[in-house]
Image: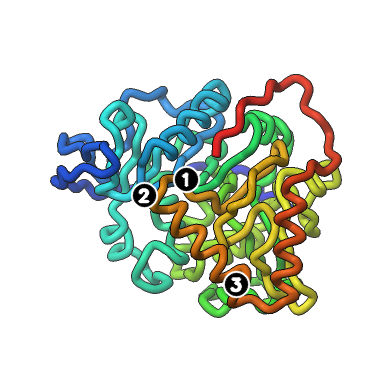
């Protein structure tokens, strides 16, 4: 892995402020209407930001099941990192969590960007919000972004302990090059003016849970300001590689996975033709419906709340069995069954495992 020497931090402008005047209630929680519920406003009542790591729990909904996932993160990582809720302006966050919530206004961020991939934050423009979070919380060495529909069946500290000695600037799942996975549909969105990489060297990754360094986010910020754009799961890895920063895989079995993490923490799959298949414990879709039995494993997507769960069942049947080719169904079924059984891995004896949440 190539690493870039540390650089001095640049200065950033002030963020956009907008008062949230929506007082509707969702899932029994009322939206806050006080001045703290503003976009571009650093969460208050927190430590000074000198911790090595920040963890941003990214959600646009906040029901009791999602609250349990957030509380699990806080309980298991509170001594290792500073934990935030990271949400679009207008998200219904309970009042007791507002001091640790960072709201962003995507419309404002989009209007200020040189170039964007479509008009919505999903798919592809999540990096604009993550850069906004970084600019207002610049004092961390590493930033974890974890989506609300990610479940880790163990203590989150087990995962962080396993990678704490890995200095990679980008630590993500399913890292693949264009040469390895040419049929990924988002390659065509990438606009990388002046990029020194050949197209075969372009990289993509899967970002429901990932870690990026301060240097990495600064480099992404600089390149985005120069007009680099595209789906963020391709854009960010390409920027990191072009900047000669370091990259590593959380687990799995790809080329970027260190030997001691091979077949740990998640499974995913690509076909020989370079198609990313909807199979394994960590995938785009359909939502996982089988019991999450395998320990110390990342599962995604795992929907929370009755409405999302019902939608997930329909999507599971629709995409797993009706739309996909028989070979994809067979592979998906294999990986679903695999998720019920533990794969051999080193045990973190010094870390106590917690009760599963999911």
Which secondary structure lies at badge 2? loop
Residue 202 image position (x, y, % from top left): 66, 70
Per the image, the residue denoted by label 2 is: 60
Q: Which mark is residue 343?
A: none
N-terminal of the pair, mark 1 or mark 3, is 1
- Mark 1: give few (<14), some (14-19) or many (20+) Cα within 10 Å: many
CA gap between label 1 and label 3 equals: 33 Å
**On screen, residue 72 above or below 323:** above
Per the image, the residue denoted by label 1 is: 148
Q: Which mark is residue 195?
A: 3
In screen coordinates, is 12 left or right of 253?
A: left
CA gap between label 3 and label 2 equals: 34 Å
- Mark 3: give few (<14), some (14-19) or many (20+) Cα within 10 Å: some
- Give the residue displayed 50% in from the left and 35% down from the top: 54
Res 267 visible: yes
N-terminal of the pair, mark 3 or mark 2, is 2
N-terminal of the pair, mark 2 or mark 1, is 2
**On screen, residue 34 above or below 39:** above
In screen coordinates, is 39 left or right of 319?
A: left
């Amino acid at each position: 892995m190539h690493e870039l020497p540390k650089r001095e931090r640049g200065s950033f402008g002030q963020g956009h402020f907008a008062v949230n005047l929506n007082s509707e209630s969702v899932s029994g929680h009322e939206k806050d209407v006080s001045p703290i519920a503003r976009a571009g406003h650093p969460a208050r009542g927190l430590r000074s930001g000198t911790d090595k790591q920040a963890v941003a729990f990214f959600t646009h909904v906040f029901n009791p099941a999602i609250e349990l996932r957030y509380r699990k993160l806080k309980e298991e990582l509170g001594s290792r990192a500073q934990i935030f809720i990271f949400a679009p302006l207008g998200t219904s966050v309970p009042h007791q969590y507002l001091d640790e919530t960072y709201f962003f206004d995507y419309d404002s961020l989009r209007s200020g960007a040189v170039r964007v991939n479509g008009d919505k934050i999903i798919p592809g423009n999540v990096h604009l919000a993550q850069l906004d979070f970084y600019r207002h919380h610049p004092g961390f060495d590493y930033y974890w972004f974890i989506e609300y529909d990610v479940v880790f069946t163990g203590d989150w500290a087990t995962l962080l302990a396993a990678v704490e000695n890995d200095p990679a600037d980008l630590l993500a799942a399913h890292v693949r090059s264009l040469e390895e996975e040419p049929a990924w549909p988002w390659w065509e969105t990438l606009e990388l003016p002046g990029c020194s990489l050949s197209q075969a060297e372009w990289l993509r990754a899967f970002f429901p849970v990932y870690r990026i360094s301060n240097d990495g986010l600064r480099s992404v910020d600089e390149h985005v300001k120069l007009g680099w754009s595209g789906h963020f799961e391709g854009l960010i890895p390409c920027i990191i590689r072009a900047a000669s920063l370091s990259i590593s895989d959380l687990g799995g079995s790809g080329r970027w996975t260190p030997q001691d993490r091979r077949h740990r923490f998640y499974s995913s799959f690509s076909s020989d033709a370079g198609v990313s298949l909807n199979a394994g414990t960590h995938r785009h879709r359909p939502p996982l419906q089988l019991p999450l039995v395998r320990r110390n494993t990342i599962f995604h997507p795992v929907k929370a709340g009755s409405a999302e769960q019902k939608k997930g069942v329909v999507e599971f049947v629709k995409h797993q069995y009706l739309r996909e080719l028989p070979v994809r169904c067979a592979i998906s079924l294999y990986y679903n069954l695999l998720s019920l059984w533990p794969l051999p891995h080193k045990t973190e004896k010094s870390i106590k495992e917690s009760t599963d949440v999911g």
